[in-house]
């Protein structure tokens, strides 16, 4: 199995470019189910220790089903397949450019949540037109055990987010442990109180905001807790999209105006949006990824951990 590693603003992406499981043809939404149900050990082999770690995001390069796409991709992390992943899409584009499969220009990428369009510029910067994003609830009051009352918004940016503005530990790198603990308590409270996205899905990303480290380079800094318990090293493109949806709904950001979102490492994504019908927006997120490794995986039958150390299989019945 052949792998290319990259990072986008510090957040890793590991693309399986060859030797992945055969998922057949058809829409990516069907293929991601086959991947989850029949090939979960490949997800684990790529993302989990000993080859990976909790922050790793993998992507399986596939033939596209939708017309006019350069490729398809199924993203996944240490616990399950992901809906959409913007930092991963930026990493994928950098990987395809590294392989010489694409050059500067606009490219369609088929994913389980629809086609996304990514533009690579001459300098290596990638802009992703993400999926339509929207806020479903504003100022939800949540009673969080061990923490107290926390207010936040619920929004979709390709994944479900609970966005917190005015509570929690200060958002800086020195507070990683406290932020992770706080985010975990909030996520657990959302689950036990029965808050979900408007499609009934779990709100599995918690995003906490603070002021930027340097207002000359960013408008705000975030901390994003991902479903597997790791924090996003990048500003999180789907999280930035959810933020744009909230800013747009509150009338705090005009169409086309740029929002500079720093992550916890102070790497920055730039986001703007085009309004859509029904209060939805089409976010555009740009950032940069760097390829930093190429590997050929060996699966030795005698190695008990050749498919990774699986702490949380996304489907316990899968092989
Ligand atoms: O950039 O969309 C993103 C993302 C989702 C999870 C980790 N990164």
Image (spheres, helix red, strand yellow):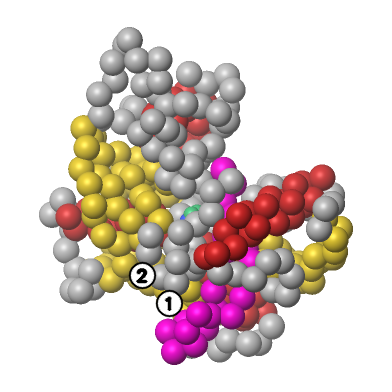
The answer to whether residue 260 is above or below residue 73 is below
Point out the residue furthest to the left here: 100
Camera sees residue 193: yes
Residue 148 x, y percent position in the rendering: 85, 61
Mark 1 crowd level (few <14, some 14–19, many ≥20, 10 Å Cα): many
* Callout 2: SS: strand
Give the labeled residue for mark 1.
270
Give the labeled residue for mark 2.
287
Q: Earlier in the sequence, mark 1 or mark 2?
A: 1
Q: Is residue 224 magenta?
A: yes
* Callout 1: SS: strand
The foreground one among 277 and 118 is 118
Span colored in magenta: 206-228
Camera sees residue 26: no
Q: Is mark 1 within 8 Å of ligand 1?
A: no
Residue 233 x, y percent position in the rendering: 46, 59
Which image quarter: residue 295? Answer: top left
The foreground one among 200 and 97 is 97
Image quadrant occupied by the N terminus: top left
Q: Is mark 2 within 8 Å of ligand 1?
A: no
Residue 130 x, y percent position in the rendering: 46, 65
Q: Are marks 1 and 2 in contact (CB under 8 Å)?
A: yes
Q: Residue at x 69, y 73 (%)?
A: 165
Mark 2 crowd level (few <14, some 14–19, many ≥20, 10 Å Cα): many
The residues bearing labels 1 and 2 have C-alpha atoms spaced at a distance of: 7 Å
């Amino acid at each position: 199995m052949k792998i290319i590693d990259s990072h986008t603003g510090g957040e890793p992406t590991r693309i399986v470019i060859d030797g992945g499981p055969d998922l057949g043809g058809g829409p990516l939404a069907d293929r991601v189910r086959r991947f989850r149900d029949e090939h979960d050990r490949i997800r684990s082999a790529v993302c989990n220790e000993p080859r990976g770690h909790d922050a790793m995001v993998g992507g399986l390069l596939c033939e596209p089903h939708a017309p006019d796409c350069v490729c398809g991709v199924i993203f996944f992390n240490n616990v399950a397949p992901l809906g959409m992943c913007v930092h991963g899409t930026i990493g994928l584009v950098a990987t395809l450019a590294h392989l010489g499969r694409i050059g500067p220009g606009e490219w369609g990428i088929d994913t389980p949540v629809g086609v996304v369009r990514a533009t690579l510029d001459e300098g290596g910067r990638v802009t992703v037109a993400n999926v339509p994003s929207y806020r479903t609830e504003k100022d939800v009051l949540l009673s969080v055990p061990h923490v107290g009352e926390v207010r936040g918004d619920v929004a979709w940016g390709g994944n479900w987010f609970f966005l917190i503005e005015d509570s929690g530990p200060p958002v800086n790198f020195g507070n990683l442990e406290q932020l992770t603990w706080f985010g975990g308590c909030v996520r657990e409270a959302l689950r036990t109180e029965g808050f979900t996205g408007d499609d009934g899905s779990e709100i599995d990303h918690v995003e906490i905001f603070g002021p930027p480290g340097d207002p000359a380079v960013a408008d705000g800094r975030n901390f994003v807790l991902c479903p597997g318990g790791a924090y996003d090293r990048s500003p999180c493109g789907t999280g930035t999209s959810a933020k744009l949806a909230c800013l747009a709904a509150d009338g705090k950001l005009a169409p086309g105006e740029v929002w500079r979102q720093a992550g916890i490492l102070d790497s920055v994504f730039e986001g703007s949006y085009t309004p859509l019908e029904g209060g939805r927006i089409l976010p555009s997120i740009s950032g940069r990824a760097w390829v930093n490794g190429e590997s050929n995986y060996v699966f030795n039958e005698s190695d008990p951990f050749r498919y990774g150390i699986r702490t949380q299989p996304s489907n316990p019945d899968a092989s």
